[in-house]
Image (cartoon, rainbow, N blue to C red):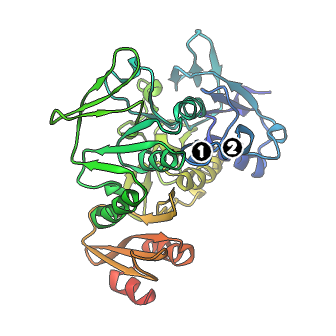
Amino acid sequence: MKVSERIVVVGGSLAGLRAMEAMRALGHRGEIVAICGEDEMPYDRPPLSKQFLKAGWDDDRLSLRRSGFQELDVDWRLGCHARSLDAGAREIGFPDGSRLAYGGLLIATGSTPRRLPGASALKGTHVLRSLAEARALREDLQPGSRLLVIGAGFIGMEVAASARELGLEVTVIESLPSPLLRGLGAELGAWAMGRFADHGVDVLCGATVKGFLGETRVEGVELGDGKRIQADVVVAGIGVVPACAWVADSGLDIENGILCDGSGATGLPDVVAAGDVARWYNPVYGEAIRYEHWTSAVEQSAVAAERLLGGHGGVKPLAQVPYVWSDLFEMRLGIVGDVAGSDRMHVCHGSLEGDKFLSLFGRDGKLCAAVGMKRPRPLNACRTLISQGASFEDAVSANA
């Protein structure tokens, strides 16, 4: 086996796995080595804050390949962390000093959760990104306990909803004016806050954390205004950062992720990137954007795999309109596009008072986003309309 035939995939989660599957489907029969930082075979992350946290799913159900991994013929190196990338030598370096040569490299190292200063020193404080972190959090979520969630994004609100369904007392702290502001906008964020209140979850917006209470185990937090909130468990859901520090000296263009063209190619020869760690040029929006969504990782991985196998200029750039979903109590929400900066909103196919609706968002006369609750078909149609540059008025008419 020639070194030039070896493809190394750094990152063994969704984007990395789907890229390896795509390579095999495209006919690549050469050596593939998967460098996986975790000790687990690839698993699905979205259920960690929902079905798995509520003990409805076991570990096996999280697997991203129910049929098994053997047929991929991949050299899986679990619990292995890449430390450096030497593009000139075409080698990956590891903490023990060893090196691995590659002919092609796909970087899919994902992202890591932000942590609050002082939190990691106290038992009972958690972040949620990995299966190991989900196991630890699930162990701490005992009925009757008090959970405090810091951050009202999707992860924080999903954990809050799951914990409430498990019988915990739940409080959410958010520094912004409403929960889920970036994903849903102010009006729908306030609507979601009301739904959470109906389920007994207290959401405090415009609040910041000054410090943690407790000596060895967390007992609560002190807010910026001096108020103290008691808690037995604290979860920080304050966002993630792309896991690309290990390639900082490689020559890659790194700013909020690894800069890529519309097919995943980086500035280094035979090096592509996909998933949370990558910031792809998106022809729909005319700029490079980093997405942290399941669907984006899947769509990017197939294109990046084709590019790595020699597609070069023949690979069509991925025109990607983001899509993400979330389960919050009875609310099955889907979001396409980008709500941020919208100046108009129109609710159709139901109402906010009911259990089904579609909300359209406009910006500068164009349809920029749509949020649907239990409305998958019109929501998917809106994704197409956004990619086509449809006007807001045309989208409203199409959904009358």
Q: Is residue 244 above or below residue 54?
A: above
Identify the residue position indicated by label 2 in the image: 62
**Viewer-nearest residue: 336 or 155:** 155
**Viewer-nearest residue: 289 or 358:** 358
* Residue at x 51%, y 38% (from the top left corner): 110
* Residue at x 56%, y 38% (from the top left corner): 108
Q: Residues within 10 Å of mark 2 (few under 14, many from 20)?
A: many
Q: Amino acid at mark 1?
A: Lys
- The tally of labels here is 2
Q: Position of residue 92 (x, y in %)?
A: 58, 22
Q: Position of residue 115 (x, y in %)?
A: 37, 29
Q: Amino acid at mark 2?
A: Leu
Q: Quadrant of the N terminus?
A: top right
Identify the residue position indicated by label 1 in the image: 54
Q: Position of residue 350 (x, y in %)?
A: 45, 82
* Residue at x 41%, y 26% (from the top left corner): 248
Labels 2 and 1 touching (C-beta < 8 A): no
Q: Is residue 75 left or right of residue 130?
A: right
Element class at badge 1:
loop
Foreground tag (2 vs 1): 1
Q: Is residue 209 left or right of residue 310?
A: left
Q: Where, by quadrant of the figure, is residue 238 drawn?
A: top left
**Viewer-nearest residue: 220 or 17:** 220
Q: Quadrant of the C terminus?
A: bottom left
Q: CA distance from mark 2 to mark 1?
A: 14 Å
Which one is earlier in the sequence, the residue at label 2 or at label 1?
1
Q: Is residue 345 visible?
A: yes
